[in-house]
Image (cartoon, rainbow, N blue to C red):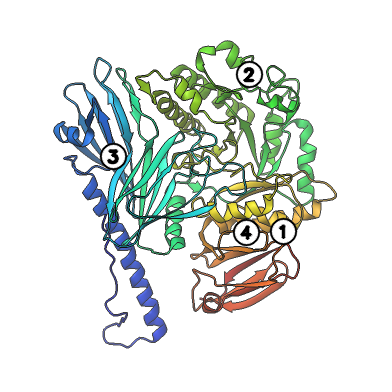
Amino acid sequence: MTMKAGGVRDGRVSSRGFPLNAAVRAALCACLLAVCAAAAEEGAASAWVSDHFRGDGSSLPFSFTYDGKASDGLLRQWPSSSETRQLDALRTERTLSWTDPRTKLSVRCVVVEYADYPAVEWTVYLKNNGPEDTPILERIQALDVLLSKEAGGPFILNGIKGDWTVAEGYEPYELALGAGARKEFAPGNHPGKSTSGPDGWPYFNLSLPTGRVLMAVGWPGQWAASFACESAGALRVLAGQELTHLRLKPGEEVRTPLIALLFSQERDLAESQNLWRRWYVAHNMPRVDGETQRAVTQIQVGGGEQDIASARLFLENGIRPDICWRDAGAGGTTWYPSDMEPWKDALAWLNTGTWEIDPAKYPNGFRPFSDWVHANGMQFLLWFEPERVGSMESWIGRNHPEWVMPCNEQGALLNEGDPAALEWLIGHLDGMIKEQGIDWYREDMNGVGPLPGWRGHDAEDRQGITENLYVQGHLRLWDELRRRNPRLRIDSCASGGRRNDLETMRRAVPLTRSDFQFPDMKGVIEGNQGHTYGLSFWLPFQGTGCYQYDPYAYRSFYLPLFGMGGLSPDNVEAQKRAYSEVRKVGPCMLHDYYPLTEYSLAPDRWIAWQFNDPGEGVGVVQAFRRPDCGEASMTFKLRGLREDAEYELENLDTGKELRTGRALMREGLTVAMAEKPAAAVILYRAVSP
């Protein structure tokens, strides 16, 4: 993998013999260097595609074993074809196809290149077009590449941990992979949920001598990836569905996870991640009416006509949320029938499987409430958990036990790989969305993970088939709901933030990044500071709830999606202030991200970060002095500003001041807080060119 950078010969620029002053010369040099760097990045991506997607199949970046033979040898022998089409002005799709003359197994690799970012992605599809079962397909790897560099230091791999409802979720890591080193990743804790556990985050940033390569594995199931340093200068990278050893029946098709690569010339970790964030917003976040999701706020509601008064109370106090959110409901307060076996009392909400509105609680359904919400310029969100059949006394359990797979003690699985089950689910949910006026479809997945259910359903010669067909069905469900309801938004939740891989994030946004958010959880405030610090490297849009009402607490939860608990006389002023502040902070968080301190959960430290919108010249600094921190002030050197611009800074607690970008980046911004713990929010905007 080779990337060559361009540059300006000696840092001097002139125009037809006219001398340029130092400031202009420096600005032009910076522009030219940026253009050269961007051109080099795009060139690296194009060169990589040319090297790895040749029609002869000699250096393809994926692999599998078929009937005991390696794919690289087979594909060179099979008849092949190639087709290219323009998806839009910025994306070109190329499909490479091969067919086994003997068994009629077809292999399609669909590659997408981007004109405005140095990115490439691909997915491989394998289909049995023959009249009989295929031989065994196994060890299907969506990514299989050997990266090389000159001997010297180790390969450096950066990333973050996944979510498992702890303070340490999303903690950044940096690994040095020298000769003989090997690191494996896969979802854990809740296996089968794609971003669960310490080694469960399917996004990676690999540093090479020529820059960085950012990688993503898109698979809302049990993926696996490994980085093995075979020698001082060679790193083998593998990624795919964790287990595949299967025959395909006639007409059956499986697919690999989506693989996406982004090439950056930046040696700096934050700058390379900002290239990712920009590409992610431009080409990955789901769009409604052509627009990506903006920063929003929410309140929790009951959803009945009787609940309009409590929701109106927020409006009367000057809090106008974007979303009225009806969640599952604890105990017997569920919106669906749940008074059955096996779960009782506080756990009755686990008796899922009847996706009808409980007529005893909501005789007129949710439509009166959602109509009121819409009339007041807000949106209505409703929680669902269709995959887990928590009670076999539910409608699904009683009427279609053939659709259900045993899984774990929290319930069985509705098999979304079963065509009949999937078609019923699509039609039923679509009907509810239309009839009840649902703007946000919130899909949860509780229990300790679907993997036991998938693998328990497989035959010995069909290992991995249930998961693969299930994942395809799951993605089709979301795609079809969005196709039938073009303005529908989807919220991805799986016991918090445990299923947020790239395929999922192209269809949904995570309004709950983790269930580690409640006041009785030890370290929840500092833990959520850590969550923002780590997750912001990868996901610009994220959300959580806050149920504490002092500034140090609620400022630790500010995100593009923010909401608080029930309104009361004791907390109304705190809620008014928090909702007002986050309206200013949230939009900044969708742009470039710069950590200003090291990551830490220690109570005697500061932690701080900056979000910067270079196009608009606005941004925010958030800084936190923790409970045991002895330092009353700290100075932070800001990043990404225009040196010659003057910025107005507004500390939401102390007032305004003017500083130049040069001073803020070179001398820094000093934040002082006499009390501890304490939090500061400093907004800024450029007031001169």
Q: Tell me where residue 649 sits by quadrant.
A: bottom right
Tag on residue 438? none
Q: In this view, does 352 lie above or below 688?
A: above
Q: Is residue 66 above or below residue 250?
A: below
Q: Is residue 24 left or right of residue 331?
A: left
Q: Give the mark nearer the N terminus: 4 vs 2.
A: 2
Q: Tell me where residue 272 sits by quadrant.
A: bottom left
Q: Mark 3 points at which residue?
A: 62
| Distance from the alpha carbon under mark 4 to that under mark 2 | 43 Å
User: Mark 1: which secondary structure?
Assistant: helix
| Distance from the alpha carbon under mark 2 to that under mark 3 | 41 Å
Badge 4 local density, few (<14 within 10 Å), some, or many (20+)?
A: many
Badge 1 local density, few (<14 within 10 Å), some, or many (20+)?
A: many
Q: Which of 411 and 523 is in front in this view?
A: 523
Instruction: Residue at the far front: name it.
Output: 180
Tag on residue 585? 4
Identify the residue at image location x=77%, y=35%: 307
Name the quarter where the N terminus is drawn: bottom left
Badge 2 local density, few (<14 within 10 Å), some, or many (20+)?
A: many
Q: What residue type is labelled 1?
A: Tyr
Residue 439 horizontal/vertical position (percent)? 60, 37
Q: Mark 1 points at which residue?
A: 552
User: Mark 4: which secondary structure?
Assistant: helix
Q: Name the residue under label 2.
A: 391
Identify the residue at image location x=55%, y=63%: 598
